[in-house]
Image (spheres, rainbow, N blue to C red):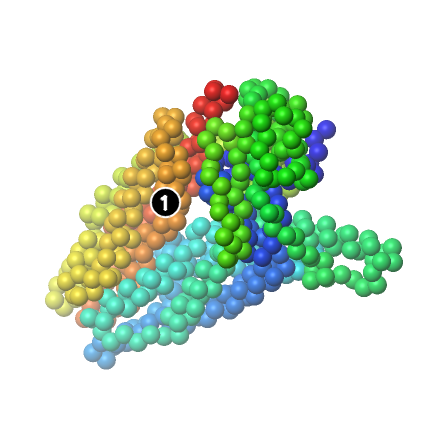
Amino acid sequence: MTNYMEQDNYIACEVCDTLHHKHHLTGLASARCSRCGTTLYRHVGLRSADRELAIAFAALITFLIANAFPIVELEANGITTRTTLIGAVLNLIDGDRTLIAFMVATVTIAFPFVEMMALIYLLMPLRLGRKPPGFDLILRTIQAVRPWGMIEVFMLGVLITVVKMTSLARVIPEIAMFAFGALTFLIAALVSFDPRDLWDLADDTIVRITALRLHAARGGVSHEPTMATATAGVPVPAQAPQGSAATRDASHPPRRPQSTPEADMTTSSTPGDSSTPRPGIGPDSQPAATADATTAREPGSKTSQPAPAAPHTYLTAARCGLVSCHSCGLLNRHVPGAEKEVCRRCGATLHSRKPDSLSRTWALLISAAIMYLPANLLPVMHTSSIFGAEDDTIMSGIVYFWTSGSWPLAIIVFIASFMVPMLKLIVLAILAGTAQAGSRWRPIQRTRLYRLVEFIGRWSMLDVFVVTLTVALVHFQSLATIYAGPGAVAFGLVVVLTMFASHQFDPRLIWDTIENSGQHHD
């Protein structure tokens, strides 16, 4: 019978699937994968939960203010126009640009609001030692909407629009502009908190509160414990955990990992040495080699990180017959032949790898590449004034900023609206192509490229936000009116499709070839 208490002492890297022994951390410490450098988990305790709850409340209040008041006001020849974010969205709908309106509304209004409300809903009961109803579903919702919240990109779009409008009219900043500026910093602080850590925090909270209540019922404590009295810190381990590579073939029956909390983590096990305590895949396994995982210390620590071992020496969850839940990160025993496997903690459907990852990535990538041409060739804005009509493409807007002396904004728009989408298309094609070909070429560098694509994906929406605000503001009756062009729709689709493509790509495919070749040489 599988001992889940021992199995839960391990964690698999979500990028390369390497198995690591899990330790409790304190302070600002975090644990990183020694194979690919991905952050595995951070310390989450009462203080971090309280801080996130306070930030969520502050962000929610600021968010409501930002959407209730105008962002900016334009004044030209005695005519004044102003707009709110919601007003800008409604203006797009009136101009038959419903698709752009939907994209802007979801990434700047709906998704950030859902995340803030969901965090408040989860964190408040946890502070009292209770797990709120629907905890798993709400937390998975946070994970789903977080990558799509783009308040900080929208704020940059506001600043670019303000600079652009100074040549047309007198620009007067309104309350919402400052509110969005403050909200940008609050959201940045909020997203630094990994929602996956809430599952561990909830488990620890319930266990500690239950233990203290039992102790109180037996006469040990005379008062009802709170979260503040139930939580205690655990020191950061002196050395990083170990992972080991199995010598058995993947077709052999899977065995569970053995917890060895008493093991000296600085000791390297050797083949055949059964006396050395180590986290293997079972008491009958003979590890071929070991590899240290990296535990990031408190700021100021001078402990050097161990040099990574050869790729094939790392033990992965797949080789142990384990599947890591993509939602909560818990390791589950793989059941061969099962029609559907679900996580025993959060109920999410389990997959050892994302289903049809490469085919879906290619389909989305090709679609984005097709839309990239009209996005750059068709006008994103159409201007109608007493001087005639004019169409502006993305490149013409960049040229306008450059010739008008706003070269820093020209560079920002050029990078975000032209270079970033092209870079994403090229990098995703390289990642999907090398993974499909089973290439062993530079896996660490390819992993870094994947992280880069994930990070910069949202910033391509910058031009869409500039168009949205410009269209909403420039309505000076017969003097000048601006409408969103078809290029804006195509460009928005490029951004969304490339983000979906990067989410569908499974980075563990980069390392599977390395792992398989390592098994072959074992």
Q: Is residue 428 visible?
A: yes
Residue name at image x 28 percent, y 65 percent: 161
Residue name at image x 32 percent, y 59 percent: 465
Q: Is residue 189 above or below residue 444?
A: below
Residue name at image x 51 percent, y 31 percent: 314
Q: Secondary structure at mark 1?
A: helix
Q: Is residue 122 above or below residue 19?
A: below
Residue 190 location (% of width, % of height): 50, 59
On the rendered structure, is 462 left or right of 214? left
Amino acid type for the residue under numbered disc 1: Val
Using the image as rendered, state which of residue 401 and residue 174 is in the foreground: 401
Residue with the mark numbered 1: 453
The quarter holding residue 499 reads: top left
Using the image as rendered, state which of residue 261 and residue 414 is in the foreground: 261
Q: Is residue 488 visible?
A: no
Using the image as rendered, state which of residue 363 and residue 207 is in the foreground: 207
**Crowdedness near tag 1: few (<14), some (14–19) or many (≥20) residues, C-alpha within 10 Å:** many
On the rendered structure, is 125 left or right of 76? right
Q: Is residue 216 above or below residue 162?
A: above
